[in-house]
Image (cartoon, rainbow, N blue to C red):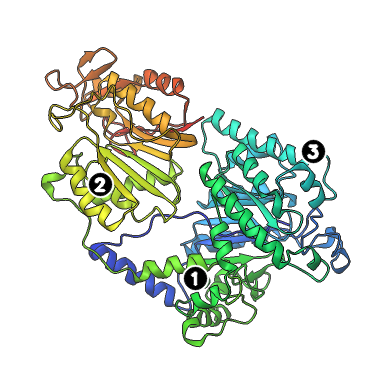
Amino acid sequence: MTEATEATDSTPDAPTDGPAGWLARWRERRRLRSPRPRRGPALVQIGITDRCHYRCLMCTAHSPLVAARFPPEGERPQMERGVFDGLLRDLVHLGGTQQIDFVGIGEPLLHPDCLEMISAARGAGFRVGLATNGSLLDGERVQGLAALGVTKLHVSINSGSEEVYREVHPNAHPGARRRILDALLEMNAYCEREGIRRPRLALACVIFKLTYRDLPGLVESAAEVKATDVHFMPMGTTPETQHLALDPEEWQEAREIMREADRQARQLGMTTNAPDLLALEQPGKCREVYARIPCYVGHEFCLIFADGQVRFCCGCDLTIENLNDRSFREVWRGGAYAQIRRQALALPRTKRAPAGCACFGACPHWRQNVATHERLQRPPQRPLIPPKRLQFVGDGDFEKVGASFLRYFVELGGLQPHHRVLDVGSGVGRMAVPLTRYLDERGGYEGFDIVPAGVEWCARNITRRHPRFRFQLADVYNEFYHPEGKQRASDYRFPFPDGDFDFVFATSVFTHMLPGDMHNYLSEIARVLRSGGASLITFFLLNNESRALLEAGKGTVSFPHEREGCRIADPETPEALVAYEEAAIRAAYQERGLTIIEPIHYGSWSGREHPLSFQDMIVARKR
């Protein structure tokens, strides 16, 4: 059984400052208060099969302890391809859906059309997640999933050791756990070899008598395969499996183990859901939450079972309608769904949960509901836009350029809301401002620059509103911006420890650096990145195509003067504009253990058509 999982991916929020923020919030409030929303759910989880080849002891559907209550595996439902294709068409038509997760009562990879369904979902423009027990993963299959562009892989390994794995999975072959980890390592190697983005990987474990003391080993395994997340899942019970659940004394011990595992994971650059799970253990936690705020899940989420049942959420037993009877579009906008949405939105007033829902017990969506409600209630603030006299970094609209790069950070660089971020050359916060709306309470931002006025403005305006965003002056000499600087850029050591960041970016920095300075900064970026972390850096890159375009007079800038290791636009102010041979930059990345994620995203500066931006962008991952 592969459990339905919480949404862990986020996208940049709409603007929250100024008139645009007022309008965005008004529209979102109207959408989330309508019982018949025009847009589809942001996240859809689909169980494409109820069949599973594993017999996990704690499973409520496939454990050998409950086998007598269910039909044989071969008779259990699988989603028909026509039903899936119709669902996909409806989601495209409705709009608003960002991610589809393949989950369910069974093992998704047992469905004969699983990979084709994933390919269809990716082709329709959705991000795709897959929840699996991992036992069917091998080198060929993980390469196929990565090549298809799966963005999230959730592997329920349910153990921290081979011994416990065998106890939990009595019909597993010897060495099965090791083979799963080896397959994930092969996936990482394949992505690095091919220069493609790795799926966001989570290792998961159901917490019960056999597993709760094995959590430290789970975290170690997650670090080995370079996972980004570790998920702890509470055990669902049946009369036959109740004896496997933790008693109060064991729960007390499990809480301390989870807290230590969470600390251990964070030190290794991973996140866990332990804080949220432990919060649910507080008596009356969800009742207290929904006494204050509505439930928005009926607008943002949907769970669909293999037999076509449409469920309100993964924390309730409430079936709305069935896709074998009506299309998803009709169900989503139908009267039955509207009635339940009204009940969920009225929770603070009525104090009554929809029938079959766990709103006042262990709601799996309480954290997302709190975040949505706070976003809607957030008072508008004056826009964080520096005065024109301080906008010394680049041309273009301050807000639009920042929003565009945030999209590049997320879509190209794999930036996640919980990441710790370094902005090399933070300027006047053009990149920091949109990040304040994206990074969550688990994330953090550090920025440094050589221009005192820019650092002062950011600290006074951005840090004051967002204390997790910190700025500091780099005491680096520059004839124009910081003539009092005491260090050379070629000798400057970033004021952060090794492996401190998940994501580092430098925009319009290396385009103003001569070789000695540039090579040192690239080395420092590699040093402060954690293993598996990503960087996005902009350049002017010279290759056969860009040179031909420049010679044809199509470029907006040119570099007629040669210096050792680079070309420049103006010999009197050599750092005004600097270009590098692409081959030399590729070699520099390789020397520093940075693998370029192909393709390089070339800019418009040389006259190329259909560019993403003005400068060339290189996204890379640290080995």
Taking the spot 39% from the left edge, 52% from the top edge, the residue there is 439
How many angstroms separate mark 3 from mark 1 (CA)?
Answer: 43 Å
| Residue 241 in which image quadrant | bottom right
Tell me: residue 419, above or below residue 5.
Answer: above
- Compared with residue 421, is residue 602 higher up or lower down, i.e. above or below? above
For the point 84% across and 58% down, which residue is it? Answer: 74
Tell me where residue 555 appears, x and y as whole percent: 23, 28
Say if residue 291 shows up in the picture: yes
- Residue at mark 1: 299
Characterize the local packing of mark 1: few (<14), some (14-19) or many (20 or more) Cα atoms within 10 angstroms.
many
Q: In which quarter of the image is residue 150?
A: top right
Instruction: Tell me which label, 3 or 1, sits earlier in the chain.
Output: 3
Q: What residue type is labelled 1?
A: His
Q: Can residue 40 be seen in this view?
A: no
Where residue 531 sits in the image (x, y, percent)?
50, 34
Q: Residue furthest right?
A: 68
From the viewer's side, name the closer residue of 249 and 207. 249
Q: Which residue is drawn at 25% across and 56% down?
A: 464
Question: Can you identify the residue that label 2 sits on?
Answer: 429
Circle 3 SS class: loop
Q: Residue 175, labelled with which disc?
A: 3
